[in-house]
Image (cartoon, helix red, strand yellow):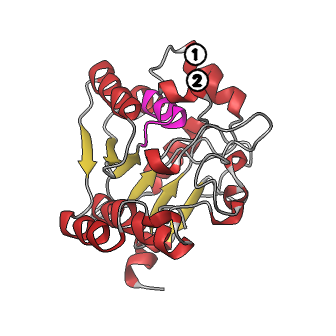
Amino acid sequence: MSQTSQQFANVPQLAADAGAEQILAAGLAAAIGPVTLACSFSVEDVVLIDILHKVASKVTVFALDTGRLNEETYEVAEALRERYGIAIDWYFPEGQAVEKLEREKGLFSFRASLDNRHECCRIRKVEPLRRALTGKGGWITGLRRVQSVTRAELAAIELDQANGGLLKINPLLNWSDEQVWAYAEQHRLPVNRLHRQGYPSIGCAPCTRPIREGEHPRAGRWWWENPEHKECGLHR
């Protein structure tokens, strides 16, 4: 274990039924350094911004602009900025890397193979995330266990070795779809219009489609791949 990882090795132990605010409080107290929320403007992230506004308003918010987002996603970002008066820290992929990828492989290389898709995600998401998390002691996500098979073993607070040993805080890990939507509706939160059009999970526009009746909520993400591969590299 590296020295950086040792610095953040004390992951707090929480009850299995710990609530979102308990998880947040424990994570914020345990992190050595500032904590930030990774926001993709999904309904989960909107819920988290509302909770943070009430209990930890000094937590910063960042977003990754991959260059392939839907207009509806930007609309939610603006609505949140205006409603809560928050400054969203936007991170973009390195321009030269995107230019090289598109010149050499075209605009849809990610559909040709899993390796190509991982390359695109690395350039557009993973590398900007690394910059967003530099100097941070922890980050907050909207991940939930019910979202996919790749998230079934999610913990409330984890040691994120892939990003230098900082804490990864998942306050909504035990929330159901019904709980998330009930909170959003009760508090009249701004929600991405695509959710109402059959998109339970929203990423880059070319890699996201509405799901069909009876399909898993993550079926619309990278729909040409097997379920166990449906992560972009942000959550390893």
* Whether residue 78 is situated above or below residue 120 in the rendered picture: above
Residue 185's label in the rendered image is 1
Q: In the orientation shown, which residue stands out farthest toward the left?
A: 96
Q: Which residues are magenta?
A: 40-50
Name the residue rendered at 67%, 38% in the picture.
Answer: 211
Q: State left or right for residue 10 relative to residue 4.
A: right
Q: Is residue 13 magenta?
A: no
* Whether residue 206 is situated above or below residue 212 in the rendered picture: below
Determine the secondary structure under disc 2. helix
The reply to whether residue 222 is visible in this rendering is yes
Q: In the orientation shown, which residue stands out farthest toward the bottom?
A: 1
Q: Is residue 49 magenta?
A: yes
Name the residue rendered at 32%, 53% in the picture.
Answer: 34
**Amino acid beneath label 1:** Glu
Residue situated in front as seen by the camera: 1 or 47: 47
Give percent across and percent down for residue 63: 34, 46
- Assign the C terminus to one quadrant of the image: bottom right
Q: Earlier in the sequence, mark 2 or mark 1?
A: 1
Mark 2 and mark 1 residues within 8 Å of each other at the beta carbon: no
Q: In the orientation shown, which residue stands out farthest toward the right?
A: 214
Within 10 Å of disc 2 (Cα), the crowding (few <14, some 14-19, many 20+) is few
Within 10 Å of disc 1 (Cα), the crowding (few <14, some 14-19, many 20+) is few
**Amino acid beneath label 2:** Arg
The reply to whether residue 11 is visible in this rendering is no
Q: Which residue is mark 2?
A: 196
Q: Nearer the viewer, mark 2 or mark 1?
A: 2
Please identify the dominant SS of the magenta region: helix
